Image (spheres, grey):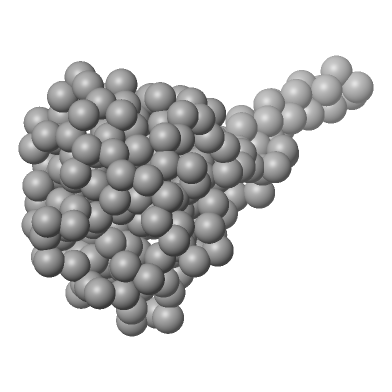
Amino acid sequence: MKLAHDSFRRPILLLALVVLAAGLAVATRQSPAQERTLYWGLSGDDVSRVQQRLLDWGFYDGPVDGFYGSETQQAVVDFQLNNGLVPDGVVGPDTWAALGFPPVPAAAPPPEPLAVSRGVTNRDAVYLLAKVIEGEAADEPFEGKVAVGAVILNRTRSAAFPHSLAGVIFQPHAFESVSNGQYNRPVSEESLRAAQLAMSGWDPTGGSLYFWNPAKPVNPWIWTRNIVTQIGRHVFAR
């Protein structure tokens, strides 16, 4: 009788293990991490998920192609405005949560935001910064290119501006080249090197938060700032 009892128990135990393993596999597939901050120029499955959700909710009518372009960015801004979020066009933790994708608990604290450190070497971040340097300072000397990058990074550490690189860059009307699309021109090697040096800590502006070309029409308010230096055709101020 004991042999018969064991012969029934073993298949049942095996079946239970199979069911448990299948359940764990399903749970793993249904709980992808959503830690990555999304902004213009990125691509991937997480971008597709955002596009699909915005499409389902009527904020987006473009293709679900996994590329974070201008249509996706505008849809994110519209969604953020509709949900009381900062309309920076960046999908960070708050926007992920509002979209219905709560963060997955992590075993270790998440990494600090990009803007906290001046020594960031992330390739996407360098390229994004280089795009704005190219748009704002393509015809400036190399030091002037680094200076523009330094101002953008200085803003990420100021309480008066967003605390992420993408948030600063895509803040409405913050940079003319972003508003008019000039930052989408091909990025030069010089602008890439300038972005890398700015992120490594070189700041020729002495901590400036603003820059402008005095030969162009500007808001008179800008001249009330504390001017630090002039590099090339740009004036830099705090």
Q: How many marks?
A: 0
Q: Nearer the viewer, residue 46 or 140?
A: 140
Against 130, is 237 above or below?
A: below
Q: Quadrant of the N terminus?
A: top right
> Is there any visible trace of residue 207 in the rendered image?
yes
Instruction: Say above or below: 73 vs 38.
Output: below
Q: Is residue 195 left or right of residue 179?
A: right
The image quadrant of residue 191 is top left
Q: Residue at x 38, y 25 (%)?
A: 196
Q: Is residue 41 visible?
A: no
Could you tell me which residue is drawn at 15 percent across and 51 percent down?
Answer: 177
Report x, y in % for residue 83. 40, 79
Left or right: where does residue 13 sit relative to residue 141? right
> Which residue lies at the image location 49% right of the left edge and 46% below the top edge?
207
Nearer-the-camera pick, 5 or 106 = 106
Q: Residue at x 24, y 43 (%)?
A: 132
| Residue 211 point in image, percent of width and height | 30, 53
Q: Residue furthest right?
A: 2
Q: Position of residue 45 (x, y in %)?
A: 31, 41
Quarter residue 214 falls in: bottom left
Image spot of residue 168 (x, y percent): 38, 55
Q: Report the quarter where the C terminus lies.
A: bottom left
Q: Foreground: 135 or 115?
A: 135
Pick the residue in front: 11 or 216: 216
- Is 66 located above or below residue 56 in the figure? above
